[in-house]
Image: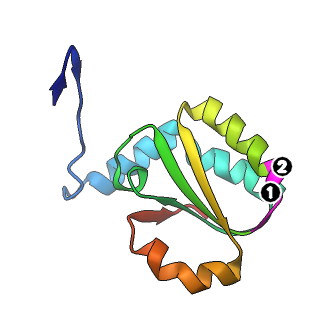
C-alpha cells in the first residue's frame, strides 16, 4: 500500500512459508531473547504470550504482552522501559496471577497469540 512517499507491506499469513518468515522477523527484532534474559529476574513467570497484531505478523509499533504469574512490578517497569528502547516498539503489558488467567484463559487465547514462554 502506498501512502505518501512510503510503501507499506503486509505478510500473507495464509501462505505456507509465513510461520518461518514470522520466526525470522521475531528473531531479528530480538524480543524472544530479551524476554528470556529478563524472565528469571521478574519473579515466578509461568507463561508469556504475545497477543493481537504482533502475533499476526503485523508490526504496528505496539506489542501486547500477557504475563502469567507473580512478578515484581518495579522490575517489570524497568524491563519494559529497557525493552522498548532496544526493540524500538511500545509494549503494553497485562499481568495475571495463575488463578486469574485460568478464569479468563478463553477470553485471551481466542485472540491471535503465540506463546513465548
Q: Residue 36: x, y in percent? A: 68, 53
Q: Is residue 55 above or below residue 108?
A: above
Q: Nearer the viewer, residue 18 or 75?
A: 75
| Quarter the N terminus occupies | top left
| Quarter the C terminus occupies | bottom right
**Which colour assignment does the render follow?**
rainbow
Q: Quadrant of residue 44?
A: bottom right
Label placed on residue 71: none
Q: Residue 27: x, y in percent? A: 50, 43
Please give the range of residues in magenta.
70-75
Q: Answer few, some or many: residues within 10 Å of disc 2's Cα (few below 14, many 20 plus, some between 14 and 19).
A: few
Q: Nearer the viewer, residue 114 or 84?
A: 84
Q: Quadrant of residue 4?
A: top left
Q: Residue 54: x, y in percent? A: 42, 50
Q: Residue 86: x, y in percent? A: 62, 31
Q: What kind of element bears circle 1?
A: helix
Q: Earlier in the sequence, mark 2 or mark 1?
A: 1
Q: Residue at x 49, y 37 (%)?
A: 28
Residue 18 in magenta stretch: no
Q: Answer few, some or many: residues within 10 Å of disc 1's Cα (few below 14, many 20 plus, some between 14 and 19).
A: some
Q: Is residue 8 above or below residue 11?
A: above
Nearest-to-viewer mark from 2 and 1: 2
**Is residue 35 rendered to the left or right of residue 104?**
right
Residue 73 in magenta stretch: yes
Q: Quadrant of residue 85?
A: top right
What whole-number distance in Å separates the C-alpha atoms at marks 2 and 1? 9 Å
Q: Residue at x 56, y 56 (%)?
A: 65
Q: Residue at x 60, y 84 (%)?
A: 102
Label placed on residue 42: 1
Q: Is residue 44 above or below residue 42?
A: below
Can you identify the residue that label 2 sits on? 74
Q: What kind of element bears circle 2?
A: helix
Amino acid at each position: 500500500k502506498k501512502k505518501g512517499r512510503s510503501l507499506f507491506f503486509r505478510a500473507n499469513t495464509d501462505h505456507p512459508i509465513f510461520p518461518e518468515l514470522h520466526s525470522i522477523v521475531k528473531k531479528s527484532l530480538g524480543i524472544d531473547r530479551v524476554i528470556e534474559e529478563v524472565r528469571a529476574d521478574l519473579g515466578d513467570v509461568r507463561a508469556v504470550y504475545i497477543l493481537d497484531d504482533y502475533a499476526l505478523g503485523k508490526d504496528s509499533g505496539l506489542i501486547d504482552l500477557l504475563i502469567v504469574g507473580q512478578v515484581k512490578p518495579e522490575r517489570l517497569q524497568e524491563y519494559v522501559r529497557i525493552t522498548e528502547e532496544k526493540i524500538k516498539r511500545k509494549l503494553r503489558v497485562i499481568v495475571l496471577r495463575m488463578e486469574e488467567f485460568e478464569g479468563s484463559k478463553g477470553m485471551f487465547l481466542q485472540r491471535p497469540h503465540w506463546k513465548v514462554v
